Image (cartoon, grey):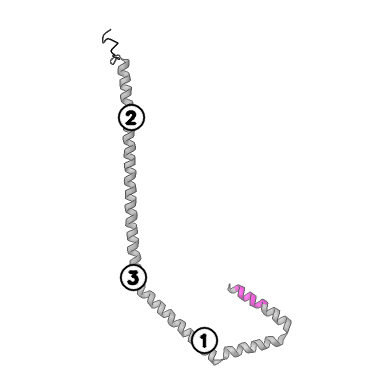
Amino acid sequence: MKRFLFISGLAIGFVVGSRMGRGPYESLERNAREIVEDPEVQRKAAQARDTAGKAAQDAAETVKEKAPVVAETAKAKAADLADTAKDKASEAKGKAAEKKAEKDAEKDAAKTEDELSESSEDTAAAGGDAEVGEDRPLSS
């Protein structure tokens, strides 16, 4: 932004200076010097510098006073958030363990069913468990 203003000022000065000649430029320069050297303007500029300095000091003092309180509040809030995050992580870990246990139980149940059905097929094939119905006698 500063660069743009500087280049714009140069361009305007060049155009104005080239069209009007040296006279208006010298008049403008003289007026600017009068304004800068005016005691009232210098007094106001000094007053503005003093006011800005006092405001900066007040702001610095306020920051020094409030910084420990703000830091302690931020530290406490961060600790609370960390505890909350740890709690949620442990809950998620617990839920994941429960799901894993459920899946393992389902796998064990399925495995047990498969083993039972295989063993019953083996005994039926060996003749140990023949189908008995009302229309079939026990011994043949």
Q: Farthest top residue?
A: 140
Task: Look at the magenta stretch and give its main secondary structure.
Answer: helix
Q: Which residue position holds label 1?
A: 45
Residue type for callout 3: Val
Distance Cα–Cα, label 2 vs label 1 = 91 Å
Place residue 96 in its image quadrant: top left
Tell me the residue at 73%/84% (across/down): 21
Residue 50 x, y percent position in the rendering? 46, 85
Residue 5 located within the stretch drawn in magenta: yes
Earlier-in-chain disc, 2 versus 1: 1
| Labelled disc at residue 69 | 3
Question: Crowding at label 2, few (<14), some or many (≥20) Cα neighbours within 10 Å?
Answer: few
Cα–Cα gap, marks 3 and 2? 63 Å
Where residue 8 appears, as percent x and y from the top left, is 64, 75
Query: Which tag, 3 or 2, sits closer to the chain's start?
Result: 3
Pointer 2 residue:
111
| Residue 111 placement (x, y as % from top left) | 33, 29
